[in-house]
Image (cartoon, coloured by chain):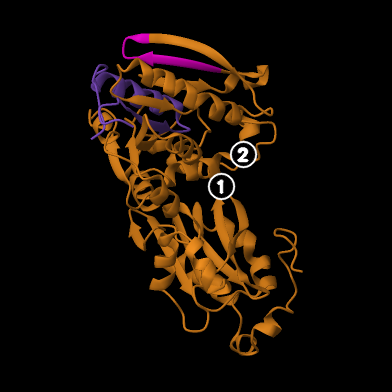
Chain colours: A orange, B purple
Amino acid sequence: MALHHDLTSAVDRAVHRTVRDAGGLLGSGDAPLVNDCACCALREDLVPELLRLAGEDRYRLAVVELWDSVEPQAMAGVIAAAGAPLALTGVTTVIDPALVLPYLSNGDDLADVGLAAAPTDQRTVADTFARQLEYPTVIAVGEDGTHGQDVEAADDTDYALLAQLTPGARKVRVGSGALGGVLLAGFDVSAAAARVHPACALLPQECDEHGVSTFVWRRERPFHPQRLYAALEDLTCAAARSRGRFWLADRPDTLLSWDAAGGALCVESSGPWLAALPDAAWEMVPVERRLAASLDWHPEQGDRCQYLTFTSPGLDRDGLLAMLDSCLLTDDEYAAGSDCWRQLPHAFDGLLDPVT
Amino acid sequence: MSRDQARLPVAVVAGLHADARRAAVEEILRTVPARWRCTTT
């Protein structure tokens, strides 16, 4: 049985719910918007509806088919939190291999293409697609040719891009008949959250295949805020997708996340580095993060580090390397110490909470 | 929860590529039998 909430009618202040099986429609209904937000309505309606279906005790698997721009992480969390009798056993994102690069390069706002889930939805096609792609443990690869005639068939470049962006995810072909069984295997929401958390994310590995490259850049010393700020546009546009964590000299206690797709960059604070926390606070940090930090612990900087990955066809590795290295503190600036670093111009105050 | 209380396995299927997503869901519905009782162990 498949449960689907159609958010296209959200402008009419309702979300339309359908339940169907292989034989056709089993039932339908509407859920009212919550706080003018279709995603909130979905959250409110999803678990009660699943519990009702569980009570019928006749289904082997409930497929929650999310509407286009709904992201799986939030809904997986809602279902897992509900607990018994619901058991989250699988999460997948279905992709058309020929559309991976076009979607990843699409910087349009969801609102402009009719895919926003709320009036305040500021996501873009590219960043939404990237998060859909990177969260699941299973990627369902659609049959080539389902995308219409205006898009070329997928080639080795498309599959190489998909493989490099989804390390560790199992790829299952739609049409193989295996997807249903794979989605019954089990799913750990805590581990999945850790895999995409900026502090310990499972990032792509160095690779160069079929014209698609992943460049991994790791350094210890911090960025000079002004030099990095001046390079943001070039760095953002250098790759179809870039991710990771970094630190700025003028705010050395803050772990910053780098999340770029479709020519747009989101820089956010992800809280303090572990090295900036008192020992007693470490118990409150997920074990996956503590483990990741311990693997690369620096004697002076602790877990502070630059760890960025860039994945794209036609990637200019040498250019990226030179640009990134030029944004780090120089030897003299680094030697001046953290008290001097904190006095550097706060170039990111327009993107982040101002340094106080 | 008692040992023989039925549970409902749930799988989340996402995707901006709506046609591909629908095709995948239809395949799952065809290949996973509708009636099957799953109990906790």
Q: Position of residue A170 (x, y in %)?
A: 29, 44
Position of residue A29 relative to residue A140, above or below, is above
Which tag, 1 or 2, sits closer to the chain's start? 2
Residue at position x 53%, y 23% from top?
Answer: A45
Residue A21 highlighted magenta (yes or no): yes
Q: Quadrant of residue A345?
A: bottom right
Residue A304 visible from this viewpoint: no
Q: Secondary structure at mark 2?
A: loop
Please say if A150 is above or below A331.
above
A129 versus B23 height, above or below: below
Answer few, some or many: residues within 10 Å of disc 1's Cα (few below 14, many 20 plus, some between 14 and 19). many
Q: Quadrant of the N terminus of chain A?
A: top left
The magenta segment is A16-24
- Say whether residue A110 is left or right of residue A306: right
Instruction: Assign the C terminus of chain A to one quadrant of the image.
Output: bottom right
Counting from the top left corner in percent of width and height, residue A116 is at: 62, 31
**Residue A184 visible within the image:** yes
Mark linked to residue A18 = none
Residue drawn at x 50%, y 51% as measured from the top left: A240
User: Residue A12, located in which quarter of the rendered image?
Assistant: top right
Residue A108 numbered mark, or none: 2
Which residue sits at x=43%, y=41%? A100
Which three-letter amino acid code belongs to the residue tagged 2? Asp
> Mark 2: few, some, or many residues within 10 Å (few <14, many ≥20)?
some
Say which mark, if any, is on residue A262.
1
Front residue of B39/A295: it is B39
Residue A335 location, x and y as percent?
61, 90
